[in-house]
Every structure is written in C-alpha cells, then in structure tokens.
Image (cartoon, rainbow, N blue to C red):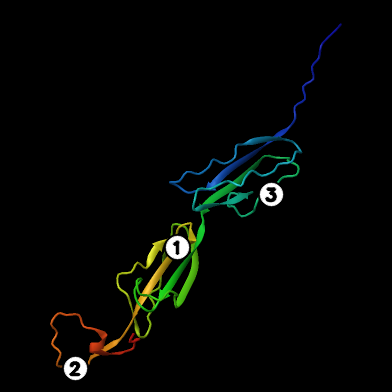
C-alpha cells in the first residue's frame, strides 16, 4: 500500500509591536515601525531611530509604557514584545544681551552682560528687566519670545539709556524751536563727545 505523507513543521513565532505613548498633536508624525513576526530564538534589532518633525525629538524605545526602562536589542526572542516610544518637544538655547548705552541704533557693539539658558521649543522665554543705578530701560522693547529650533533666532537684546543731568549754561536763552545742542548745557553723567 503506497501512501504519500507530508510532514508539516510549524515554527513558533513571536510578535514585536512598536507604538507611541506620547506624540505631539497638530503635527505630522511618522508612523511607528510595522509589527513584525520573528522565529523563536532569532535575534531582534530595534527599529529606528524615528525622524521626528522639526522642533521635536524621538526619545527612543522603552520596554514599559511609562518609558522608564530603555529597550535593547533581543539576542534570542522567546515571547511577544511591545516597545513604547515617545516624541516630545525638543529644547534649544536662548540668549539675552544687555546693552547699557542706548537703543539698538546707538548701543555699543558688545553687550555688557549676557545671560544664556535653554527651554522647550514652543515655550516662551522672557528677559529680566534689570534695575541698574544710573540707567533707565528703553521703553517699548519686546522682552519675551517663543523658543524656536534655531538657537541663533532665540536672542533678545535689552537696551538701557544712561541717565544724565542737564544744567542750562545760561538762564537768558529763549527757546525758539531750534534744536538745542550739548554745547547749550553742562552734562553730568555721560561722555561729552
């Protein structure tokens, strides 16, 4: 009696799933890697890195949904895995420059004080208005701005006027609408040039 028998071998496979637990809303985020099946005892290399949208960073894959334990490559898979990733706002540096001698058109080329820091892209940073004896802050300056990805755009310049005292040289001069010059006054507290 002649029979044809076919033997079917099935290999045990395990599933590896990638999903985001945190991602920004309102921007296009790349899909996580597709779910893949791996044969029992085979090696698994983590997918990635994901290319996030501008102003965001991909923090990596994690073994837990709270994203506290970083995931690593698997040398020999023996169960199903789900890896969790998050895309969060990136950070950027910012600079605040302080100029003591006038407005943006007349200030010295080098700031007399500079403060640097960093913050989350999209957040607002604010320059501190310093109180300095002998100086008055120039009015109507923008002292806050949103942080953007390009650090060179995250700069606020703050300008101060030096306080001066003007004493008229003569009490006999009648103001007739013509511009007065520094020669008409004794100036205290500033260069006379």
Q: Residue at x 37, y 80 (%)?
A: 131
24 above or below 92?
Answer: above
Q: Residue at x 77, y 25 (%)?
A: 9
Q: Position of residue 61 (x, y in %)?
A: 62, 48
Query: Mark on residue 72?
Result: 3
| Mark 2 lies on residue | 170
Q: Position of residue 7 (x, y in %)?
A: 79, 20
Element under disc 1:
loop
Q: How far apart are the alpha carbons under marks 3 and 1?
A: 36 Å
Q: Could you tell me how many numbered marks the image carries?
A: 3
Q: Circle 2: is it few (<14), some (14-19), or many (20+) Cα within 10 Å?
A: few
Q: Position of residue 137 (x, y in %)?
A: 33, 77
For the residues bearing labels 3 and 1, Cβ distance under 8 angstroms: no
Element under disc 2:
loop
Quick one: quadrant of the C terminus?
A: bottom left
| Mark 1 lies on residue | 154
For the residues bearing labels 3 and 2, Cβ distance under 8 angstroms: no
Q: Position of residue 183 (x, y in %)?
A: 25, 88
Q: Circle 1: is it few (<14), some (14-19), or many (20+) Cα within 10 Å?
A: some
Q: Nearer the viewer, mark 3 or mark 2?
A: 2
Using the image as rendered, state which of residue 19 and residue 125 is in the foreground: 125
Q: How far apart are the alpha carbons under marks 2 and 1?
A: 49 Å
Task: State which tag comes first along the sequence, 3 or 2.
Answer: 3
Quarter where residue 33 is shown: top right
Q: In the shown orientation, is residue 83 left or right of residue 172? A: right
């Amino acid at each position: 009696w002649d029979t044809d028998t076919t033997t079917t071998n099935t290999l045990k496979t395990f599933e590896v799933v990638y999903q985001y637990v945190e991602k920004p809303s309102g921007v296009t985020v790349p899909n996580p890697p597709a779910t893949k099946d791996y044969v029992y005892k085979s090696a698994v290399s983590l997918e990635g890195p994901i290319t996030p949208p501008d102003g965001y960073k991909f923090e990596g894959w994690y073994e837990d949904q709270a994203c506290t334990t970083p995931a690593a490559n698997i040398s020999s898979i023996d169960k199903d895995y789900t890896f969790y990733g998050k895309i969060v706002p990136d950070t950027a540096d910012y600079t605040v420059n302080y100029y003591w001698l006038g407005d943006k058109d007349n200030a010295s080329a080098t700031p007399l004080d500079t403060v640097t820091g960093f913050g989350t892209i999209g957040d607002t940073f604010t320059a501190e208005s310093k109180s300095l004896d002998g100086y008055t802050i120039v009015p109507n300056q923008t002292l806050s701005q949103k942080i953007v990805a390009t650090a060179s755009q995250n700069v606020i310049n703050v300008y101060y006027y030096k306080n001066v005292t003007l004493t008229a040289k003569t009490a006999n001069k009648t103001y007739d609408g013509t511009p007065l010059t520094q020669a008409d006054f004794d100036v205290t507290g500033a260069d006379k040039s």
